[in-house]
Amino acid sequence: MTRPPRRNGGARRVRCRCGQTMLRQLVGHRAALDVTADARELTATEAAALVEPNRLAWCLRTVAGGPDLRWLGGRHPPDCPHPHVIDHQCAAPAAPQPRPRTSRTSTPEGQLALDA
């Protein structure tokens, strides 16, 4: 991914390592949360259906500075006219895991070793 967005700006379009375009924004009190959401716009109902314990839906509003993400908290109207987006789940393969080290013995095969 690219570097984090500016703190006082709205959402920026960035490209994920999986190739998908995303919106990224620091939100919350003192920019406590770094949001990375899919750029594909959904209705409020479609976004709400994709919510999971660690995947939130966001209302995408246009303000003077550009797009702005707002959480679909408890008081969000179901008939909201704005587009909505959902947290990004990266489909890129995970980084390869290093192979475990194998232990080598200094004793030739067939010879008994004395335990210390």
Image (cartoon, helix red, strand yellow):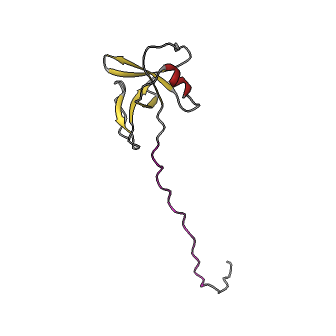
Q: Is residue 87 above or below residue 18?
A: above
Tell me: 77 left or right of 113: left
Residue visible at 38% across and 41% down?
Answer: 19
Q: Quadrant of the C terminus?
A: bottom right
- Residue range (magenta): 91-108
Residue visible at 59% across and 31% down?
Answer: 53
**Residue 84 in picture, x, y percent from top left:** 45, 22
Q: Quadrant of residue 27?
A: top left
Specify the principal SS of the magenta part: loop
**Residue 81 in picture, x, y percent from top left:** 44, 14
Q: Is 111 within the magenta? A: no
Q: Nearer the viewer, residue 91 or 46?
A: 46
Q: Quadrant of residue 52?
A: top right
Tell me: 84 left or right of 115: left
Q: Is 100 within the magenta? A: yes
Q: Is residue 103 above or below residue 86?
A: below
**Residue 95 in picture, x, y percent from top left:** 46, 52
Q: Is residue 19 above or below residue 106?
A: above
Q: Quadrant of the N terminus?
A: top left
Residue visible at 39% across and 31% down?
Answer: 24
Q: Nearer the viewer, residue 30 or 92?
A: 92
Q: How many marks?
A: 0
